[in-house]
Image (cartoon, rainbow, N blue to C red):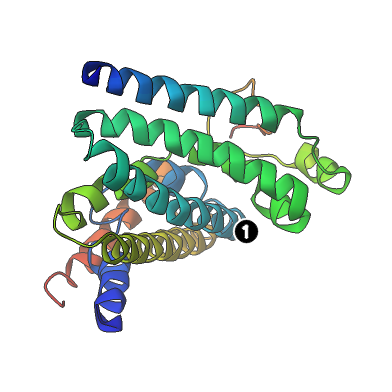
């Protein structure tokens, strides 16, 4: 498998099939943790970190356990449990070995358990990438590349949105539009802008 | 026996989650992170019982 395929998977997941603006997943952190740029960066880092690990683990479980035992119908509940366990394990590792990273990501990690973007990417990898004939390592590589692209796309959008919201706070917005209404209008315009990228790859 | 595989799979994942949760609870928060976490005022959710929850506008 060529590197261009992985690069295409990353760019496609990041810009063209953006998880927030095109698939409408992860809307809760998009609106909830985008008031300040600093919290948006922290959340993006935590999502990217967990998304990549979760994609690799869920793809492996599907390929090596769920498919051979003919139980793909439990994939959703299995992936939810895997993601919830992973978040706990990542938190333990950060507490023990990377205090600086725990300091910056600490409070965002528990929120990721309920982030539908992580589950959406894991399920999407199985629906769009996994096939019975595909070699395990190729599929795993593509799944991880997609997760990296999706995580970067999530970070790009949430950071851009938080920057706009910070500027909106200091601008003269009519009272009825202040807060969430104007934010939703901005999100809609951003979504329209990204819709223009459809068909590039 | 094959009929029990999904039950065993889900039960084992639940056990893994419970162990990970308990292990995480037992792992102490590093001293230098404690103050920062206490001072954090997160408004990402409306869960007022959350220790990180700040004031809602």
Picture residue at 42% right of the left edge, 19% below the top: B11
Asked if residue A138 is positioned above or below residue A162 in the image, the reply reads below
Image-based side of B2 in relation to A119, left or right: left
Q: Nearer the viewer, residue B30 or A186?
A: B30
Which quadrant of the structure image shows residue A83?
A: top left
Picture residue at 33% right of the left edge, 55% below the top: A187
- The residue at the far front in this view is B1
Q: Which residue is mark 1?
A: A38
Picture residue at 48% right of the left edge, 57% below the top: A48
Image-based side of A160 in relation to A10, left or right: right
Q: Residue B46: x and y, percent?
A: 53, 27
Numbered disc 1: secondary structure: helix
Q: Quadrant of the C terminus of chain A?
A: bottom left
Asked if residue A122 is positioned above or below residue B11 in the image, the reply reads below
Badge 1: chain ID: A
Q: Residue A77: x and y, percent?
A: 33, 28
Numbered marks: total: 1
Image-based side of A117 in relation to A41, left or right: left
Q: Quadrant of the N terminus of chain A?
A: bottom left
Asked if residue A170 is positioned above or below residue A10 in the image, the reply reads above
Asked if residue B48 is positioned above or below residue A98 in the image, the reply reads above
Which quadrant of the structure image shows residue B38?
A: top right
């Amino acid at each position: 498998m060529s590197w261009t395929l992985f690069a295409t998977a990353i760019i496609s997941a990041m810009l063209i099939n953006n998880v927030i603006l095109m698939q409408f997943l992860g809307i809760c952190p998009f609106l909830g943790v985008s008031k300040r740029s600093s919290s948006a960066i922290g959340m993006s880092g935590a999502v990217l970190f967990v998304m990549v690990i979760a994609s690799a683990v869920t793809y492996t479980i599907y390929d090596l356990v769920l498919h051979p035992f003919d139980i793909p119908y439990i994939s959703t509940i299995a992936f939810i449990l895997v993601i919830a366990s992973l978040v706990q394990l990542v938190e333990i590792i950060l507490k023990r070995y990377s205090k600086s990273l725990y300091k910056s990501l600490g409070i965002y990690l528990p929120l990721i358990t309920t982030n539908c973007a992580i589950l959406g990417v894991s399920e999407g990898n199985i629906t769009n990438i996994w096939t019975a004939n595909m070699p395990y390592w190729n599929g795993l590589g593509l799944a991880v590349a997609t997760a990296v692209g999706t995580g970067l796309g999530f970070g790009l959008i949430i950071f851009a949105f938080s920057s706009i919201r910070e500027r909106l706070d200091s601008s003269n917005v009519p009272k009825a539009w202040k807060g969430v209404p104007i934010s939703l209008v901005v999100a809609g315009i951003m979504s329209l802008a990204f819709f223009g990228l459809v068909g590039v790859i | 026996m094959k009929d029990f595989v999904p039950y065993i799979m889900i039960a084992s994942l639940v056990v893994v989650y419970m162990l990970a949760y308990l292990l995480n609870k037992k792992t102490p928060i590093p001293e230098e992170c404690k103050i920062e976490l206490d001072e954090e005022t997160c408004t990402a959710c409306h869960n007022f019982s959350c220790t990180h929850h700040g004031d809602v506008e």
